């Protein structure tokens, strides 16, 4: 027989434990609930103020503050956790834009003060049933006195950053000075597809460059304190087809800066060059390609050395805030050091011909291949001193992208031919043709990709230099 009187304490103990356990398990939920109730009670004892930011002013002109608040509110972290969020595709590919549902409220915190924003949409009772929109801010009166000004400033800064990130980057080219009606620059949408991720280069170097750019972006006040224009100048040097121009595009995209591509053949004088610089806008990349060619043919260009130095200094630093200057060249051997002195050019970046690491990068990007049985053979070719530009290797891979094995074999053959021709004195004059079937000959049909003599000569010259020096650490020199 079961004695229930003996079991009773046990049952009571068990029940007690269950209750305590459930209380314990639900503690976090309960704490959150308690906190919410406490807030609701506390809110009753606070005085609030409501501030409205309507979409239009009395003259039906757009209220810029409404746009800024809208960008800001829709970028709040709390929106991602809200149940009242709409998702839209942005203007850029892969971009998702969040937006708060009409008549919903979201909370923000600034300097320990809580602020609520409601996306108010009121349908008017007129014939067309127009809607009037506004953002309504709710804030404790006590906090308003303390934070309103810095909070509005914060909204302004954040929304400007978002604007900057979203806007379309433009490419500007300078036009001939004759017959101009509206400024010296013509703009086009800048749709270059390169990004820092698609450029094959030493990973450490890439990270250093990224950090350098990020540090530059954050250092406005520092430059101001030093009394210097907030600009950074980069020199990109290396053989043709090593990614210099692609790199400029990638930087411009990373920064969301417009690119002003200065064509020196269309510059008529020093003052004209100065005018061009003055007509650029802040947050832009000012680019001079093939700078060494200008140096070599300076007598034929109507820009003097002092005109160029002034330009590089941002016309005595007076008009160059938030500018990045980039100069590209194949070699800096014959450049007057005064042109490249620190402050005038801050960072030198070497773009070398391909090595095995870069090759693997290209194979992954172009062929989607991270490893392959032919890789050891390719590595051996690179170790033996053979090399080509990333552009040439990229083209070979592009042509045979459907068959990675064929693509890799064609790279091996091309590297082999290149390394053999490197030993011959006349080899630099030969035209190498990479044909569709992967074979390599000295001349061929018109469907072939043609490497010009000049490019080959420069390439070999650099290949030679690379083999002689081969020091990677020299390629990024912040303190030049
Ligand atoms: N490092 C690289 N990584 C990926 N692709 C590259 C690289 N270098 C060159 N390419 C490819 O080769 C092509 C030519 O590159 P780019 O124009 O940037 O070279 P460049 O150094 O500016 O040449 P040039 O000195 O002749 O102007 C581009 O289509 C680019 O995609
Ligand atoms: Mg280029």
Image (cartoon, rainbow, N blue to C red):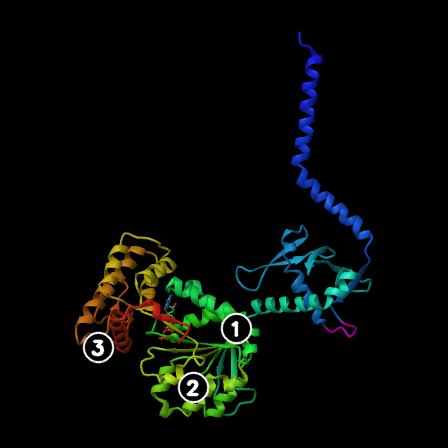
118 sits to left or right of 250: right
Mark 2 vs 1: CB contact within 8 A: no
Q: Which residue is at 33% across, 60% downward?
A: 357
Residue 59 drawn in magenta = yes
Kind of element beneath mark 1? loop
> Which numbered disc flags the more N-terminal residue, 3 or 2?
2
Quarter of the figure that contains the C terminus: bottom left
> Alpha carbon of mark 2 to alpha carbon of mark 1: how far?
21 Å
Q: Main secondary structure of the magenta part?
A: loop
In the image shown, does 106 or 193 lie closer to the viewer? 106
The residue identified by callout 3 is: 429
Residue 437, given in percent of the width and then of the height, sits at 26, 61
Q: Compared to 330, does 122 lie above or below?
A: above
Mark 3 or 2: in front is 2
Please report the bounds of the magenta region as a residue range: 57-61
Which label belongs to residue 257?
A: 1
Residue closest to the far top: 1
Disc 3 from disc 2: Cα separation: 30 Å
* Location of residue 372 in the rendering, given as x and y in whole percent from the top left corner: 30, 53
Question: Observer-nearest residue: 225 or 377?
Answer: 225
| Residue carrying label 2 | 264
């Amino acid at each position: 027989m079961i004695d229930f009187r003996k079991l009773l304490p046990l049952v009571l103990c068990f029940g007690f434990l269950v209750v305590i356990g459930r209380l314990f398990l639900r503690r976090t939920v309960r704490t959150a609930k308690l906190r919410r109730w406490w807030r609701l009670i506390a809110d009753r004892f606070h005085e609030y103020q409501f501030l409205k930011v309507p979409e239009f002013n009395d003259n039906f002109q757009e209220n810029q503050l409404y746009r800024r608040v809208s960008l800001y509110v829709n970028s709040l972290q709390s929106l991602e956790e809200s149940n009242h969020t709409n998702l839209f595709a942005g203007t850029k590919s892969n971009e998702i834009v969040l937006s708060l549902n009409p008549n919903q409220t979201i909370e923000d915190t600034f300097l320990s003060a809580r602020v609520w924003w409601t996306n108010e949409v009121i349908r008017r009772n007129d014939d067309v049933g127009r809607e009037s929109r506004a953002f309504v801010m709710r804030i404790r009166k006590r906090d308003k006195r303390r934070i309103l000004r810095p909070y509005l400033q914060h909204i302004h800064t954040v929304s400007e950053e978002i604007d900057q990130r979203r806007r379309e980057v433009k490419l500007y080219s300078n036009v001939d000075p004759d017959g101009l009606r509206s400024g010296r620059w013509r703009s086009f949408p800048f749709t270059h597809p390169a990004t820092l991720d698609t450029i094959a280069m030493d990973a450490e170097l890439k990270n250093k460059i990224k950090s350098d750019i990020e540090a530059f972006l954050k250092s406005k006040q520092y430059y101001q304190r030093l009394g210097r224009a907030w600009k950074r100048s980069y020199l990109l040097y290396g053989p043709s087809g090593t990614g210099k121009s692609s790199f400029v595009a990638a930087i411009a995209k990373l920064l969301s800066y417009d690119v002003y591509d200065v064509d020196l053949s269309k510059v008529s004088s020093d003052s004209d060059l100065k005018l061009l610089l003055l007509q650029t806008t802040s947050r832009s990349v000012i680019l001079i390609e093939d700078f060494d060619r200008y140096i070599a043919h300076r007598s034929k260009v109507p820009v003097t050395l002092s005109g160029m130095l002034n330009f590089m200094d941002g016309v005595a630093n007076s008009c160059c805030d938030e500018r990045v200057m980039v100069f590209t060249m194949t070699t800096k051997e014959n450049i007057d050091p005064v042109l490249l002195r620190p402050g005038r050019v801050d960072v030198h970046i070497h773009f070398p011909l391909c090595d095995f690491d870069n090759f693997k990068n290209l194979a992954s990007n172009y062929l989607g291949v991270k490893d392959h049985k032919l890789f050891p053979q390719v590595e051996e070719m690179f170790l033996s001193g053979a090399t080509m530009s990333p552009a040439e290797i990229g083209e070979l891979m592009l042509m045979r992208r459907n068959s990675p094995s064929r693509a890799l074999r064609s790279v091996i053959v091309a590297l082999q031919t290149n390394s053999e021709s490197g030993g011959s004195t006349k080899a630099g004059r030969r035209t190498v043709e990479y044909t569709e079937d992967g074979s390599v000959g000295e001349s061929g049909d018109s469907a072939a990709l043609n490497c010009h003599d000049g490019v080959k000569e420069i390439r070999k010259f650099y290949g030679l230099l690379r083999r002689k020096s081969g020091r990677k650490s020299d390629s990024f020199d912040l303190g030049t």
